Image: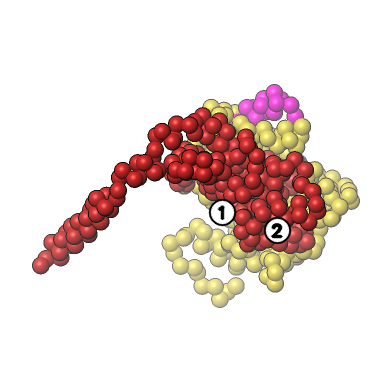
Chain colours: A red, B yellow
């Protein structure tokens, strides 16, 4: 058989197998159960508007607070890692390695239950302090590495040009280097924001009161109340409502960066 | 700050040594530029000419020796180097314009942040300076929208907007397409005829011959020969100068017999 003909045959067989597997899945699934158990409109209706006005809103707020804390602290640790003062570098390294190494869930348990148990009292501004520190401190470790990479990606000539115009080192960093660094890292920063949006679901274990629950906690509570999986599906769709547009934004930014080079 | 008053000397370099690790790139340079003088520094790559230029505004620190700019010892660790750099314009081979700022902002940022000029005055100076380099129609462009030759002229204007007493040029045309070199050299020629003190590291022999008051030939970290362009370029005394000029002026031919050197 000629090579081209054989290649076409193999491709056709591959595609046929793919379609067959899909078909078997679709035919084997009990669609009535799926509709009743996962996409039950009568169970979905009572979720609104609270799932949007409370749960989705809180997910966005907690993520934004964690990210804001992470950005500020992350910039701080990135500058420490690039410092000429060795103890600053060591401190930043220990911080970054610590928070990249421990599971987020363990850290949240520690803040939410470990600290109150050890000290006999709650953190001030509970549960918001636990949420901000719980999400923000680990995020700072990841963001510090991203920001450091961004700063190092700014060509050395930029700093030299700024300094040769008479700018001090801090002034040159603030006016010239850091703005360019953030431009370079907008795509990875957006990715970090997507990850943090999903990680914010872990604050569900903090056992927050009514009105402060976010999507995952809300979905789980409604699962118990309605004895139906539909709330979890709707909560999942709500996450996608945040993450998919962000993901598309990253792709557009990356495409624009690729063109600019 | 040691102020040694040397009337009419813009730059004085005394017994300058510079090591990069174990490599000695400047081996005891004595060099000076008078106020209003145009000095071209030529020599093969790796001869240390760019390093010498970068030692003048302390983008490289001297290992030993003295560098006086307008009578101020810039190798003194207590010198306010930012204050000295304000008085020295620098133009880089790679332009080093700030890509996140418009042409106007490139010219105003150091005026405003370093010289503390108001917005209106900074913009007026910027527009005037852009007119002198023939780019007043590009105020609102971004560096990426300009050709290499236009970028380098903006870079010259950026340095001039600080109203420096002295301009340093580090191979300003080496990164340009051949047809764009002329515009940049024309701007530099105008600047020279206006009486600007200039130190130019260059491979443009025609520019050196026409514009320089003095030509300095460096090789392997030492000043081999210096004098008026007619002498150094027209009738070089040293074999190393002759070999270099032969190679630069006849790039397609092989070097002459070097045994005489």
Q: Which residue is mark 2?
A: A95
Q: Secondary structure at mark 2?
A: helix
Q: Tell me which chain the residue with mark 2 is part of.
A: A
Q: Can you say whether A207 is above or below A104 in the image?
A: above
Is residue B221 highlighted in magenta?
no
- What residue is drawn where x is 60% and y is 68%? B239
- What residue is drawn where x is 48% and y is 31%? A46
Residue nearest the observer in this picture, A187 or A181: A187
Expressed as whole percent of the image width and height from the top left, the position of residue B196 reads 70, 39
Q: Secondary structure at mark 1?
A: loop
Q: Which of the image's four quarters has the C terminus of chain B?
A: bottom right
The reply to the same-chain question for discs 2 and 1 is no
Q: Which residue is mark 1?
A: B203
Q: Find the distance from the CA under tag 2 to the CA under tag 1.
A: 50 Å
- What residue is drawn where x is 27% and y is 49%? A26
Q: Which mark is nearer the camera, 2 or 1? A: 2
Segment colored magenta: B117-130
Q: Quadrant of residue A259?
A: top left
Q: Residue furthest top?
A: B120
Say whether residue A65 is left or right of residue A38.
right
- Circles 2 and 1: CB distance less than 8 Å? no
Say whether residue B147 is left or right of residue B35.
left
The circle on residue A86 is none
Main SS, magenta region, reads: helix
Residue nearest the observer in this picture, B234 or B182: B182
């Amino acid at each position: 058989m000629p090579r081209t003909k054989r290649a076409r045959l193999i491709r056709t067989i591959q595609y046929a197998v793919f379609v067959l597997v899909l078909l078997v899945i679709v035919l084997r699934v009990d669609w009535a159960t799926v509709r009743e158990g996962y996409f039950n409109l009568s169970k979905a209706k009572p979720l609104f508007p609270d799932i949007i006005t409370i749960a989705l809103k809180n997910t966005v707020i907690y993520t934004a607070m964690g990210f804001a804390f992470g950005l500020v602290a992350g910039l701080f640790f990135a500058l420490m890692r690039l410092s000429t003062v060795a103890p600053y570098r060591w401190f930043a390294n220990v911080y970054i390695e610590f928070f990249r190494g421990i599971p987020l869930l363990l850290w949240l348990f520690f803040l939410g239950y470990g600290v109150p148990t050890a000290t006999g009292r709650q953190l001030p501004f509970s549960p918001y302090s636990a949420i901000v520190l719980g999400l923000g401190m680990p995020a700072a470790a990841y963001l510090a590495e991203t920001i450091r990479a961004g700063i190092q990606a700014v060509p050395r000539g930029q700093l030299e040009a700024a300094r040769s115009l008479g700018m001090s080192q801090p002034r040159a960093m603030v006016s010239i280097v850091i703005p360019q660094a953030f431009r370079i890292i907008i795509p990875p920063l957006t990715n970090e924001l997507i990850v943090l949006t999903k990680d914010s679901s872990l604050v569900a274990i903090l056992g927050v009161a009514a009105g402060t629950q976010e999507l995952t906690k809300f979905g789980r509570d409604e699962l118990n109340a309605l004895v139906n999986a539909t709330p979890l599906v709707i909560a999942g769709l709500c996450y996608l409502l945040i993450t998919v547009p962000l993901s598309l934004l990253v792709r557009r930014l990356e495409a624009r960066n690729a063109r600019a080079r | 700050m040691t102020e040694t008053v040397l009337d009419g000397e813009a730059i004085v370099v005394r017994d300058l040594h510079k090591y990069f690790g174990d490599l000695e790139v400047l081996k005891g340079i004595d060099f000076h530029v008078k106020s209003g003088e145009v000095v071209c520094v030529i020599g093969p790559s790796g001869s240390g000419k760019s390093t010498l230029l970068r030692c003048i505004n302390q983008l490289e620190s001297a290992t030993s020796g003295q560098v006086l700019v307008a009578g101020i010892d810039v190798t003194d660790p207590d010198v306010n180097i930012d204050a000295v750099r304000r008085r020295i314009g620098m133009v880089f081979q790679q332009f080093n314009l700030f890509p996140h700022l418009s042409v106007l902002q490139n010219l105003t940022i150091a005026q405003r942040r370093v010289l503390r000029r108001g917005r209106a005055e900074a913009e007026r100076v910027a527009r005037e300076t852009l007119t002198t380099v023939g780019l007043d129609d590009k105020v609102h462009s971004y560096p990426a929208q300009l050709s290499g030759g236009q970028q380098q002229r903006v870079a010259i204007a950026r340095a001039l907007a600080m109203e420096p007493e002295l301009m340093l040029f580090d191979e300003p045309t080496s990164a340009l397409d051949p047809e764009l070199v002329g515009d940049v050299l024309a701007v530099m020629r105008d600047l020279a005829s206006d009486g600007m003190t200039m130190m130019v590291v260059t491979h443009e022999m025609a520019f050196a011959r026409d514009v320089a008051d003095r030509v300095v030939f460096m090789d392997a970290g030492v000043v081999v020969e210096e004098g008026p362009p007619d002498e150094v370029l027209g009738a070089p005394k040293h074999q190393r100068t002759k070999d270099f000029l032969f190679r630069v002026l006849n790039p397609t031919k092989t070097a002459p017999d070097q045994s005489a050197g």
